[in-house]
Image (tube, coloured by chain):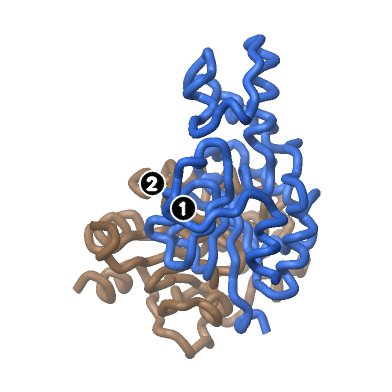
Chain colours: A blue, B brown
Amino acid sequence: MGDTKKRIAIDMDEVMADTLGKMIECYNRDYGDTITPERLHGKKLRHVAKCGDEVSRYFDDPLFMRDLKVMPDSQDVIRELQTRYEIFVASAAMEVPASFTAKYEWLQEHFPFIPATHIVFCGDKSIIDADYLIDDHAYQFARFRGQGILFTASHNVFEDRYPRVGSWREVADLFLK
Amino acid sequence: MGDTKKRIAIDMDEVMADTLGKMIECYNRDYGDTITPERLHGKKLRHVAKCGDEVSRYFDDPLFMRDLKVMPDSQDVIRELQTRYEIFVASAAMEVPASFTAKYEWLQEHFPFIPATHIVFCGDKSIIDADYLIDDHAYQFARFRGQGILFTASHNVFEDRYPRVGSWREVADLFLK
C-alpha cells in the first residue's frame, strides 16, 4: 500500500544530477579558468566566476540539462529507497522553464524506475506534501511541512540548521539502516 | 503573511483552460462530426469519437495547449482569491510531457499574476500540500490531504462524492462570500 509508506521527495539538480559539475566544465572551457568545486567552499559559481551572474546563462540552452552526469550511487540508493518509501522527484524547474523537456528526458533515461506520476516540476517546494525533502537548498525547507535533509553542495557547507547528508551512501545509511 | 493564508491548488485543463472545447473543435473539423460538450454528458470524448482513443493524439502536438480559451471568469476570480488565499496551479502535465512549454507560456500569457514559484507540473496530485484542490478529476482527490472540490466537466457529471462547482462564479461564492 503506497499510503502506508512514508514519502521522500528528492531534488534533482546537485542531488540526483551533477549540474554544478557541468557548469564549471563549460565555464572553465569558455573563460580559460581553472575553478574546481572545492574552491567554491561556501560560495556559488557566480560569486567567483570572471563573468559573474552571466554564468547562469548556460541554463538558457534548452539542452544544457540533457547530458548531466548522474550523482554517484543515486540510482542504486533511490531504487532501494523505493522498496520502503514512496519516492517523488521534486525539481524547481520553474526557475528555468526552457529546461522542462531536457529534465524530463534525463529522468526517463537515468531513472526509468521513477514513474512520471511521481515527478514534480515546481518552484516553491512548500507545496510538496512529503515526510522528507532531500535538497541542497535550505531555503526550500522554510515552509516545507516535513523534515528537510540537506544534501551537501559547495554553496551550502556553512548551513547548520538541518540534518545533512554528504553522499547517496549517507542517504542510504539514514533511511535504510 | 503567506503562511497564515489557506492554500488553494487549481487544476489547469478543463478548469482554467478549455481543453475539451479545442479537442472537440479539432475533432469535428477533422472527422466531419458534430459533437457538442453537452452530448458528452458523463462520457469522455474518446468514448464517442469515431476515432476512439486516437483522439488523444491531438495532445502529441506540442503547441496544442498554447491557444486554449480561458475558462469564463477564471482570471477575475483567481485574482480575487489571491487576496485571501495562497494560490498554486497544479497541472498533471506529466501525462503529456510535450506540453510543458506551451502550458507554461499559456499561464504566463493569461495568468501573469500567478508567479512561476506557484506553478506545479505533476502527475499524482496527492503530492500537493494544499487545503483545497479544485479539479475536474475526482481520482486526484483519493489520496489528496486537503478537500477536493470537483469542477464540473462533461465527463464527471455522475460523480457525487465531492463538493462540486459548476463555474468560476460558483468558486467565488464558495470561497469569497
Q: Is residue A63 above or below residue A92?
A: above
Q: CA distance from mark 1 to mark 2?
A: 7 Å
Q: Chain of mark 2?
A: B
Question: Where the N terminus of chain B falls, by quadrant?
Answer: bottom left
- The circle on residue B119 is 1
Q: Is residue B25 visible?
A: no
Q: Amino acid at mark 1?
A: Ile
The spot of residue B82 in percent (x, y) is: 28, 57
- Residue occupying the point 68% across, 64% down: A173
Say few, some or many: other residues with alpha carbon within 10 Å of mark 2 (under 14 / 14 to 19 / 20 or more).
some
Query: Do the residues under discs 1 and 2 have CB atoms within 8 angstroms?
Result: yes
> Which residue is more in the foreground, B97 or B172?
B97
Please identify the residue farthest to the top as the structure is shown: A32
Tag 1 secondary structure: strand
The spot of residue B2 in percent (x, y) is: 28, 58
The spot of residue B171 in percent (x, y) is: 32, 71
Q: Which residue carries the number 2 mark?
A: B115
- Residue occupying the point 44% across, 73% down: B151
- The circle on residue A70 is none
